[in-house]
Image (spheres, helix red, strand yellow):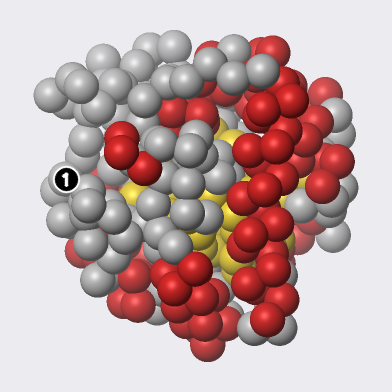
Amino acid sequence: MLYLFIMSIEININCDLGEKSKHHSNKYDPELLEIVNSANVACGYHAGDEDTMNEVIKISKKNKVSIGAHPSFNDPENFGRERINLTDLEIERLIIDQYEILQKIALKHGEYVSHIKPHGALNNMACEDINLATTLAKVIKSINKDLIYLVPTGSKMELAAKKLDMKIACEIFADRNYEDDGNLVSRKKPHALITDPNQAKKHVLKMVKTQSLNCHSGKQIPCEIDSVCIHGDNLSSLATAKSIKENLLANGLELKNLNKMKKFF
């Protein structure tokens, strides 16, 4: 079914990339970078290394994909998905170090880091904890006030960033289910992931059309949606990305890089 939009709506597709590790392969990165608008690049702390960062940035430049840092806890053993309690100063150093690693490599290619999106447990914890969310927001704004902060819609991260008048893009997850409080269903639960590309495209279009989260229970939560995240670390990522992009375009949406969206000008 095609949804009709009265006016053109901009939407972004972002993907976590460069996440080569013992946990999964990054072999689909080149193909994903032909589909998505913005790349969240692993900075070596949960996955990836200098070679993968160079490769993602090189291909992103070729395909005119905007580049973002994807900082995490320094926990490659657990792919950054285990919760770690750090002080504010430790969080500050964690984010700045990873941003600087990626920015240095991007500049070598004549590119730059235009957005930041925290990864894994760090992101999940900040969604729930306003103090951590505020710390992250302050650090990111201190790096560069023009950095776009990519945050889960309806989260404490969104709230903290808005209080600091930051440039924010609110995202939904194409391949994840939501709890009734708006947080992601834990990966430890059997219904956490959406692995069927057809189901994912319907899930996404409904959320974008209604500007609301689809919860696993059937509940809908009104929210702002600027971007759709596709995780690059599961087997159906490529098929899901293709299906979602085709469906959004077929329904009249305008796909844009984060740093090219009208809301930031």
The residue that disc 1 covers is 195
For the image, the number of numbered tags is: 1
Q: Say which of 196 and 28 sits in front.
A: 28
Tell me if 228 is positioned left or right of 139 in this view: left
* Residue drawn at x 20%, y 22% as measured from the top left: 188
* Residue drawn at x 13%, y 24% as measured from the top left: 190
Tell me if 52 is positioned left or right of 149 in this view: left
Measured from the top left, where is residue 239 in percent x and y?
21, 63
The image shows residue 48, relative to residue 82, as above or below, that is: below
* Quadrant position of residue 66: bottom right
Measured from the top left, where is residue 139 in percent x and y?
77, 35
* Residue drawn at x 30%, y 38% as measured from the top left: 77
Instruction: Report if residue 180 is visible in the image.
Output: yes
* Residue drawn at x 75%, y 60% as measured from the top left: 262
Instruction: Report if residue 36 is visible in the image.
Output: no
Q: Say which of 115 and 34 sits in front.
A: 115
Tell me if 164 is positioned left or right of 231 in this view: right
* Quadrant position of residue 250: bottom left
Mark 1 residue type: Thr
Tell me if 247 is positioned left or right of 146 in this view: left
Q: Say which of 2 and 201 sits in front.
A: 201
Measured from the top left, where is residue 115 in percent x and y?
67, 54
What secondary structure is found at the residue carrying circle 1?
loop
Measured from the top left, where is residue 136 in percent x and y?
69, 30
Q: Quadrant of the C terminus?
A: bottom right
Q: Say which of 4 and 23 sits in front.
A: 23
Q: Residues within 10 Å of mark 1 (few under 14, many from 20)?
A: some
